[in-house]
Amino acid sequence: MKSYRNLYAVLCSYENLELAFKKARVRKTLKPYVIEFESDLKRNLIQLSHELENFTYSPSPLTTFIVYDPKTRKISASHFRDRVVHHALCNLIAPIFEKDFIFDSFANRKGKGTHSAIRRFEQFLSQTTSYHKKTEERESRFWLCVES
């Protein structure tokens, strides 16, 4: 098993946090909290980096709200600043763990997801269905021979 060193230093680096910011803002560029964070991006990322380096970073409490469409769900969302840290951490650990995941693990993985999981399930279902049909055909032929 390969060991990794100095990951925490990479996590805290300005470059990693900047990449994490870019990933966290995808499809959210017009949200007020993203605009506010981006308005003083360099200072915000440097501050975040210092807090991580000095072990003083503390995530904000989650914001909880109810969504009613298409069904009622309780959602707990992290503040944008915390999502930047989440992405920074994923930048490090995803490449390390990705190669060890089984092929048919679809949750929260690049290039995977619900639609891919459904397509894969349908493949397995069609294999099982055709297997059962072949088995049923063999059994019916067997019973025809036995009854004759």
Image (cartoon, rainbow, N blue to C red):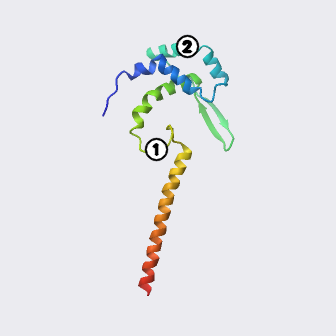
Say which element carries label 2.
helix
Circle 1 sits on which residue? 105
Asked whether residue 58 is in view, the answer is no
Picture layout, residue 105 above or below residue 90? below
Circle 2 sits on which residue? 42
Q: Please name whichever residue, 52 or 22, is drawn nearer the observer in this view of the structure.
A: 22
In the picture, the quarter occupied by the C terminus is: bottom left
Q: Please name whichever residue, 76 or 134, is drawn nearer the observer in this view of the structure.
A: 134
Left or right, 30 with respect to 60, comes to right
Left or right, 7 with respect to 72, comes to left
* Residue drawn where x is 43% and y is 30% of the image: 93
* Chain-order first, disc 1 or disc 2: 2
* Residue drawn where x is 56% and y is 27% of the image: 24
- Amino acid at dot 1: Ser
State if disc 2 and disc 1 touch (CB < 8 Å): no
- Amino acid at dot 2: Lys
Left or right, 6 with respect to 121, comes to left
Residue 73 in the image: x percent, y percent?
A: 63, 40
Q: Residues within 10 Å of mark 2 (few under 14, many from 20)?
A: few
Q: How many angstroms separate mark 1 from mark 2 (CA)?
A: 37 Å
Mark linked to residue 44 = none
Q: How crowded is mark 1: few (under 14 residues within 10 Å), some or many (20 or more)?
A: few
